[in-house]
Amino acid sequence: MIRAMVRRALVLTALAAGLMPVTCLGESSNRLPAKATQELPAELLSLLQQKKMPKYSPIVVRLFKEEAELEVWKQDTSGRFQILKTYPICRWSGDLGPKLQEGDRQAPEGFYTVTPELMNPNSSFYLSINLGYPNKFDKANKRDGSFLMIHGDCWSSGCYAMTDEQISEIYSLARDSLRGRPSFQVQAYPFRLTPANLARHRNNPNLAFWKRLKIGNDHFETTQLEPKVDVCDRQYVFDAQPPPNSPHPLAFNPAKKCPAFVVNPEIARRALEKQRADELEYARLLEGDVPVAPIYSGLDGGMNKAFLARFPYRVTLAKVMPYASYLPHLPPIPFVDNVSSLTNRWFGVSFVQPIVCDLARAGLPSSRC
């Protein structure tokens, strides 16, 4: 009888634990697991000191798909952002280009704002940071999707996946930057927006979108200040401020016409100088007929070469269907034959379906990411 009562109590306790809501960073820290509260490694603390970056100063995270790199920039004592550390990305999925709809496997591109509530210390992917997709721009352009993350475990379906060791550092840096602060910015790009890369991708239908992202990129790189991001007329607008002597503050509606605004002259001057130099280099490259990259690779994302030996079977095994309306007529690269997938033949049926982070499509609870 006593044993039965004990078993029943244990079952009820387990059920109660399973039904407990996910604890986010913005909630009480009493229930946070140790992995979410651990201190930065000694080497990273030493690097902060060398670069004169206060431990709790703001950060900006930058993501580059094609190079498979994640940068953490941190504000130093001068008030400017400097590069702190570059992390090779273990896995990202989809192709170059923005995320358009739920289930397209695309990792997002654009400017995102991460608040404490988007930090998940109880993630099944060790730790995770929700990018906040869809943002105002995405919604204005009728794009949807959910639970798009930077997380651990090196598996991705619409996310930017790191190793557990990497996400531990990145999560701690993000957590410390949110102390007394409402958010930090994430800038996600298809590649480094250099003239050479833009010239290679000049035939891509996303080029106009990428050039708009480049404005924000140039504001950041030339001033080393976080760009203020707004959305109007379904476009990103950067560092906008009211015209001189304007009696009203700026009000942006993502789907409606942009109000009259100006950009801080110093920011505008620096960005314009960079833009002109980049345009000259871009024109020179086109004149030299630089080779054009394919619009659609047919491969499922990528992995930084630093991880190829460590994770040799997680690179580009899956075929991906074209993710945008201009692509469906293109045949996918046949990584799956009539017998079975290469993954299945190598590993068995348990590896046929990748672990996913686009949860609405997978039917998994949000704590999975």
Image: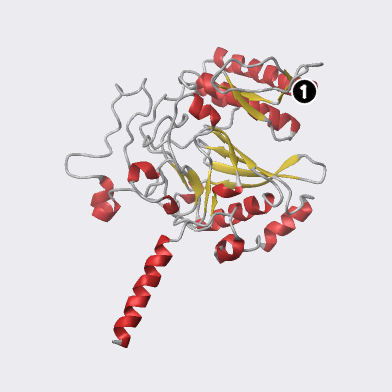
Q: Percent position (x, y) of residue 217?
A: 64, 29
Residue 348 showing in the rendered view: no
Q: Is residue 361 left or right of residue 24?
A: left
Residue in the picture at 45% in, 19% down: 205
On the rendered structure, is 1 left or right of 67?
left
In the rendered structure, the answer to whether residue 129 lies left or right of residue 319 reads right
For label 1, the residue is: 264
In the image, what residue occupies the spot 69% across and 19% down?
277
Where 113 sits versus 213, above or below? below
Q: In terms of secondary structure, where does tag 1 sit?
A: loop
Residue 299 visible within the image: yes
In percent of the image, x 29 and y 52: which residue is there?
A: 351
Residue at 40% from the left image edge and 71% from the top image edge? 13
Farthest residue, direction left: 339
Residue positioned most to the bottom? 2
Instruction: Mark 1: give few (<14), some (14-19) or many (20+) Cα within 10 Å.
Output: few
Name the image quarter holding residue 198. Answer: top right
Q: Which amino acid, by three-letter code, is at mark 1?
A: Asn
Q: In this view, does 216 lie above or below 148?
A: above
Among all residues in the image, which is located at the extreme top? 287
* Residue 323, quarter of the rendered image: top left
Colour mapping: secondary structure
Give percent across and percent down for residue 188.
55, 35
In front here: 328 or 332?
328
Q: Residue 56, percent across and down?
A: 73, 52
Q: Nearer the viewer, residue 298 or 205?
A: 205
Q: Nearer the viewer, residue 361 or 68?
A: 361
Q: Where is residue 200 in the image (x, y as percent from the top left)?
A: 51, 23
